[in-house]
Image (cartoon, rainbow, N blue to C red):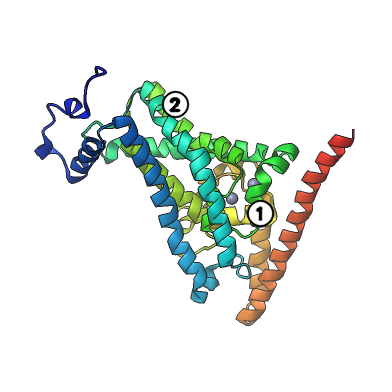
Amino acid sequence: MSHNATIADMYSGVDFTSLSWIEQQWMSWYLYIGNPILATGLASFLLHELVYFGRCVPWIIIDAIPYFRRWKLQAAKIPSAQEQWSCTKQVLFSHFMVELPVIWLFHPMAEVFGMRTYQVPLPGFREWAPQVAFFFFFEDMFHYFAHQALHYGPLYKHIHKMHHKYSAPFGLAAEYAHPAEVAILGTGTIAGPIIYCAFTSNLHIYSMYIWITLRLFQAIDAHSGYDFPWSLQHWLPFWSGAEHHDFHHMAFTNNFSTSFRWWDRMLGTDDKYREYRARVRAAKAAIKNATKEERDQMEQKLMAEVEAEGVRAEAEVLRGMEKTKVQ
Ligand SMILES: [Zn+2]
Ligand SMILES: [Zn+2]
């Protein structure tokens, strides 16, 4: 591609009529914007914003309807409108200040490794599905170890503490985090595609868009605070879901991964979580004839215990830091 080549030149020889509807839209977008770097950057950022807030809207509505409380994991903690608004402002700030530059820089960087952007045709299911599966696996592994590191004293106090502001998270809080955390954990999301591209030189940004969309759904749903009978973890037992990550926020420990349960399971960082689940199950079985209120009360009591333990554990991490300072 010469420097003087226009986007129209780049598409010379492409038979527009042979393309699918989505490929035609893709090509039209690049022709409309005229500059491929601008077109890619804009589309990527807009996709991120639309998917993020678009996915949060149903959870905001669900939080406003008391009927859904029966599936809320920490039913006593419904986020207020004011809480949701202040969370949104912080999320928007980090989207523009941290994610926008990273998203913008990602494409030229990935293109160096051979990623396709404006080109048509787009990859089909058989091409993108294994790529997206690899990105899920890689991100989950990266996040597991990086997230544990963020629970270490100084990193916790200065960076990760912010994300733990909500002991009962809600959808919007998925990306409520310190800018440094957004950058650190965001690496897990974009390093997978870059590594994949570096080794295979075969990646279209279209696969990346599918990955980002699914990853945002995963993160927002994991923070939603709701466990429905139809939630994915009931169909895929290794899927984390809200039930897994909600415990991390409530108990301040265990369950460090994002999408899957296997790292926590294999490395034993889900012991307290499983013990808690067993206690709830046993207590529920023991009071089978109790009323719904009695059962709810019992669950609230167990939750309060776990949360109090979490508050103590958090204080200990912060206290550990004080000691290091004194020495
Ligand atoms: Zn954490
Ligand atoms: Zn979280």
The picture places residue 229, in percent across and down from the top left corner, at 47, 65
The picture places residue 291, in percent across and down from the top left corner, at 63, 82
Helix, strand, or loop for circle 1? helix
Quickly name the residue at label 1: 165
Query: At 56% across and 40% down in the image, what residue appears?
Result: 182
Q: Is residue 69 left or right of residue 156?
A: left
Real-space CA distance between mark 1 and mark 2, rounded to the nearest whole angstrom: 33 Å
Q: Is residue 280 above or below residue 55?
A: below
Which residue is at the front of the view, 85 or 281? 85
Mark 2 sits near ligand 2, with its Cβ under 8 Å away: no
CB atoms of marks 1 and 2 within 8 Å? no
Residue 272 can be seen, yes or no: yes
Query: At 67% across and 67% down in the image, what residue appears?
Result: 282
Q: Is residue 220 above or below residue 46?
A: below
Q: Crowding at label 2, few (<14), some or many (≥20) Cα neighbours within 10 Å?
A: some
Q: Crowding at label 1, few (<14), some or many (≥20) Cα neighbours within 10 Å?
A: few
Residue 270 can be seen, yes or no: no
Work out whether mark 1 precedes mark 2 in sequence or the reverse, and give the earlier one.
Answer: 1
Which residue is at the front of the view, 290 or 14? 14
Quadrant of image for the C terminus: top right
Q: Is residue 88 left or right of residue 20?
A: right
Q: Is residue 4 above or below residue 93?
A: above
Quickly name the residue at label 2: 195
Q: Is residue 320 above or below residue 83?
A: above
Amino acid type at circle 1 is Lys
Query: At 73% across and 54% down in the image, what residue appears?
Result: 310
Quadrant of image for the N terminus: top left
Amino acid type at circle 2 is Ile
The picture places residue 196, in percent across and down from the top left corner, at 41, 27
Camera-nearest label, 1 or 2: 1
